[in-house]
Structure formats: structure tokens, C-alpha cells
Image: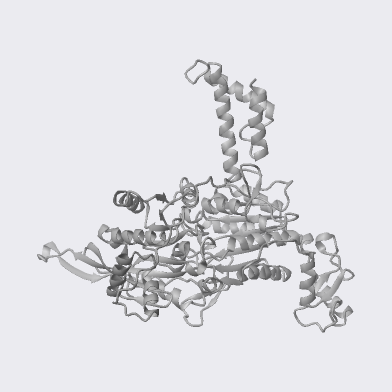
Amino acid sequence: MSGIAMQRFFSTRQRQLIYEQAEGLCQRCGIPLDESWHADHRIPWAEGGPTTVDNGQALCEGCNLRKGQQMQYTDNFVPRPFQREVSTVVLERIRAEKDRTIVLASPGSGKTLAYQSLATRLIREGLIDYVAVFVPRVALAQQCEISWMHKTSNGAIGGLCLLFDGTKRLGMIRHKISDPPLTHPNEPGSGFVATYSALVSSERLFVEWARKHEGRFLLIADEAQFCGAAGDREDGGGTKAGGLVERVHSFARHTLLLTGTPYRADNQPLILADYEPNPTDPRRMTLIRDAEATYADGIAEGYLRRFEMHLTEARVRRRTLGDPSASDGDSVLEYNLSDDGSELVPVLKDEKTWQPLVDRVVRAVKDKQKFNRAYRGLVSCMGQSEAKKVQKYLAERYPDLRVGLAISSDAGAPQELRNFKHNPMDILVTVRMAFIGYDCPEITVVGVLTHYRDGGHLMQLVGRGLRVWDKMPPREQSCVIVAPDDPKMQGFLSLLRDENEQGLKLLEEREDSEKEGSEPVQESLSFVEAAVATTTRAAGNESEMDADELQLVEYIKSAVDSAETPLKLKDVVELAGIMLKAAPSVPEQRTEPDAPPTYEPPKTDREQIAAIKAQTAEAIKQHLYQRGVTPESPGYQDAMMQATKRVNDAAGYNAQQANTLEKANRRLRAVLSALK
């Protein structure tokens, strides 16, 4: 880290001299200074004030805060307690010469805006010049750029940046893959966002940028639990990504590591993080975090919804093949999924299990849409083949539903996710990783058809439906979770209810399949022969309902055409002093609001540049066509090359060099002058 950057703060010796000169009293209000006193610049450091004893003054915390408020910009941003905590903690740790801050945050806590507002504050105070953000998926990178700052079709600026005074704030955060420059020299106060996989594939580009800007940038490792997952490139580029993040970190002014779970996706410790023994469970280690946002915080502060979980039981038949040499016949074991979830994968692959769960998701979505037509659902499957089967089933059984499909490949999933978010849709079918960090608050029903059962993954999944939507009153919003009734899902339900102090942790460690000291034994060949969904129960934040009650309430719902969830309807009935089996009065019919209009979602710089380049290429083709030169004409390729060269010469850039909106537009305009 550069020595210049470290001059921002007073040394221990300087602080002691400033304190002695002030005789232990605040130099503004005169009260005795306690341990929280601040060594402040009389002439602000950001305005050129030196970090010297002569330019220093001792202030109590209150006076320094009031002084800072007088210097603040006219922002409209009102941070949540968690976002304010992140900003405060990072500044305190920078002052204490710490090089990193670890934050454990549940989905929906507003961590993206937390680090964007933090970067704005650090830029205003002269602590950094740039921000470098790394995320696990292309969809997240695009979301980071567009949500913060984008240009509309008429050239106006849009995004969350408008919450902050434009006099000085964080600039563009452009999505980058392997195209230099990562940041433009004439745009200080800006940044870039890239995936962990891009960091691996373009290592030299990112490391050289970090070395060049040593000590002058904030590094963000977002969704860090997916950075460095061993052997799984889709989860962030393998362990090499973790090593490269640590290397970039060595050049950063400070690193903010944001994670949704205390461990990585492969159950290993997070990079750059420290752990301490768990006082209640010596077999586990606890992540040492500097700030935290839990599901309980979201409920208390009104930005996360309450939930109602519909757990569907299944009857499983497992067949074990007999030994032919011993003339043994096959044996069949039948059991309930709620008692034994060890064969969850084949159970969820059986259509007699997953189809009833999908049907329940559809019913829940249609109920929600009686409140607002824009509400929608998400179904997460084990893999691409299972997701395609679910999509096909929905298309055949519910032809009127508008169904989207986003699978794990970065080639198409980001666009599908954006289409689903910005266009009228009903259900999105997806797989693991595609939905990580996906922000679409209209999702209010989540179907769990995946076998992953660690707490972090499940919270990432159900978190897609827990975000409060600002188009509806928070008190009227809840999330319906449709899931199989296996033991580990029951454990996750308990975690949500118990508000565990460690946030969302793995439900349980992998059990040892081999007994200590026992000799290897050939196990009988067995397989799940069939699995059939049977009954469904409901459980919410505090209350629950058995299968018989749920069936009765759903019958009542159908009879009166109610859109309320079963637990809510039961609460209403019982609150009115009516027994559950008594028929409730028909609720007042709701007028369905119109569906939101379809509009073109904003595009990233990269997408806009690609579109302009396509327009330029098409304009050149049209020029040749108007002169009778078509792809079938002799010498077409030569004519295309010559026309393209004239355009490049007129613009001063070829297609590869036109890597900014200004250059791409200049090249497009050059078509008119060069091809007259």
C-alpha cells in the first residue's frame, strides 16, 4: 500500500500530541474527551489539508459528526441500519489501518447499494479513486452496472446513483470481461465489475490494473461464498479465483468481502476470512464478521417478507436386489420422505413427486396474482434436464402461463433473467447459480425442487421471494415456499424460525459413510423404485397447520375465491372467533390491477456498444446492397473490406478499438460521411 495513501490518518504519536495540546478537552464544545474522540483535520484532507499536528484538532464524537454533516452533499439516500453499519465499520477499520472488512448478509439486505454508497463516501473523502467489484455470475455483473448508473435511450442518466448528489459521487461501474481499459483515466471516481471466471481467464489484465492503482481502490468480493469453490468453474473459476482475489487484495486500499454464508460453496473456509471456535459446538468454527444482516433484521426493519412454507410428504419405495447365487428374492422397503431424505435426488426426479409440487406453485402464484397481476413465482431444479422437463410440463398443462427458463450457462441466463424481470411473466424455471443475487421483488412464490440443503444455498433460493416490493404495502406481502418435507428442509425451517445468531449456516456436516475400524463390506444393490407425493402441511414464521387442516382451508379458499394463504386465512377465521370447520363469509372481491406495461430494460455499456457496432455493420451492408453488391456478387468480400476500411479511416477507429460509446457512435456516424 502506498505511503501517500496512509497519510490520510494521524499516527499514534500525532494523536497523542493533538490530545495534549487540547488538554483533553473538545476544541469545539469544551467537554472532556473520552476514548471515542476524533483527531480531525482543520482544513479537510480531501481539500488539500496536510496530516500534521498543526492542522489537527481534537473533537468529541458529536462535534466531529456535526462538522461532517455540514460538509455532506445533498443526498436523498437514507441508509438502512445495516448499510449505515457497513459504511461506519469500514471507515473505522481503515482508520485503524486494517486491510479488510468481512460482512455476512442475507439476501435482500441491500448489500449492493451498501458498497456503492460506501464507495461514494470514500471517493468524497479522498480515500480512493476507483472501485473494483467481483461477482460470481454475468447476470450479477450486469445488474451491478445497470442498477447503479446507466444511460437511457435519450441520453439521460438513470439508476440508484440519482439518490446521491451529482456534484461528487461514484461514477460508472462498467461490466468488463477482457477488454481494456478496465477504468478510463479521464473518469476518476468510477469502477468496473467482473466475474470471478473473468478474473481467472484474464488474470494479467486485472492484476496489472491493481498494481497500477495500488492503494487507491476499494476491492469488493461479492457473494464470496462462491469464490474459490474447488473444481467448479461455474461457481467462480475454481480455487484459482480465490488466489487471484487475494492477490488483487494485496494492492487494494481496502477490501470488503460480502458473503451469504459463513463457508464457501464447497464447505471450506472463505478466502481472507478468520474463524474462531464455536462455544456451543466444538466441531464447528464460527466466522469472525465485522457487520451482519440477518433474516431477523429484515423482518424487524420491514424489507423482508414473512413466509409460509408448504411441505409436501412423499411415500418412497426402495428395492434391493437379491443375490442370484443364493436364490434370494428382491426386498422392498417403503418409508416416508419426512423420516429419511437420504435418497432425495431420485425422489425429486420422479414425476409423481415433482409434478404435484409444481402444481402447488402454480396455484400459489394464481392466488398471489389476485392481489396484483405482476406477482410471479420461481422454481429451482436440480439441473438443466430437470428444468427443461418442468418447463415442458408447465407449457402442456398450463398453456396460458407465461413461463421463462434460465439455466446455469452464462450464454443465455442473464438475458432470460432480465426478460423475466422487465416483462409480464408468471413463472421462471431455473437451476442452481442462475438465480444467485437475482433481484426481482415481484417473485413471491418459490418452489424448491433442488436437492441442495445447506443453509446458505437455501437462503439464496428462498431469498428471491423474501424481498419486499415497493409497489405493495409491506404488511400485505408474504412469501409462499413450496418444498418437499424432508428432514433437512425441516431443519432449514427451524433455522428461519429460531433466528440463529450466526445467520445462515450449513444445516449439518457431511456424515461419515464409513464406520471407524470396520472392514469394507459389499453393499446390496438397491435403488429408489418409486416416489409419490402424498400430503402437504403448512408452516410459517410462528404457526403451522397439519395436512388435514390445510386441505380443509384450501377447500374453503376455493369456495370463496380467496387469495389469502392458508395460514393467513386460518388466522383471520380464528381471530373472528369462528371455528376452523365453520364456513367463513365471502370476502369482498378485489379488483385486479392492470399488469405493468412492457418496456425495454436498460442496457449495459457493453450491450449498447455491441448494438451500435451491429448497426454500423448493417449500414455498410446496406450501402453495398444499394449499389447492387450482394453476398452472392463476385468480389463481395473485397468490397466489404474496402467499405469498412473507409469507415474506420473516417472514424479513426476500427471495430475492435471502438470500445466506448463515444467511439462506437463516432464510427457509426462515419458511415454517412465515408460511404457517400
Quadrant occupied by the N terminus: bottom right
Place of residue 509 in the rendered image (x, y in percent of width and height, measured from the top left): 41, 72
Q: Residue furthest left?
A: 327
* Residue 59 vs residue 29, the one in the foreground: 29
* Residue 222 vs residue 247, the one in the foreground: 222
Place of residue 13 in the rendered image (x, y in percent of width and height, measured from the top left): 83, 75
- Quarter of the rendering containing residue 492: bottom left
Q: Which residue is drawn at 48% across and 77% down?
A: 500
- Quarter of the rendering containing residue 454: bottom left
Q: Which residue is drawn at 50% across and 50% down?
A: 422
Place of residue 561 in the rendered image (x, y in percent of width and height, measured from the top left): 34, 64
**Residue 525 in sight here:** yes
Place of residue 163 in the rendered image (x, y in percent of width and height, measured from the top left): 67, 58
Q: Which residue is drawn at 80% across and 75% down?
A: 63
When the figure is inspected, residue 27 is found, relative to residue 345, above or below; the finding is: below
For this view, does 382 lie left or right of residue 523? right
* Residue 345 vs residue 542, the one in the foreground: 542
Indicate the colouring scheme.
Answer: one colour
When the figure is inspected, residue 269 is found, relative to residue 643, above or below; the finding is: below
For this view, does 603 lie left or right of residue 43? left
Quadrant occupied by the C terminus: top right
Total numbered badges shown on the rendered structure: 0
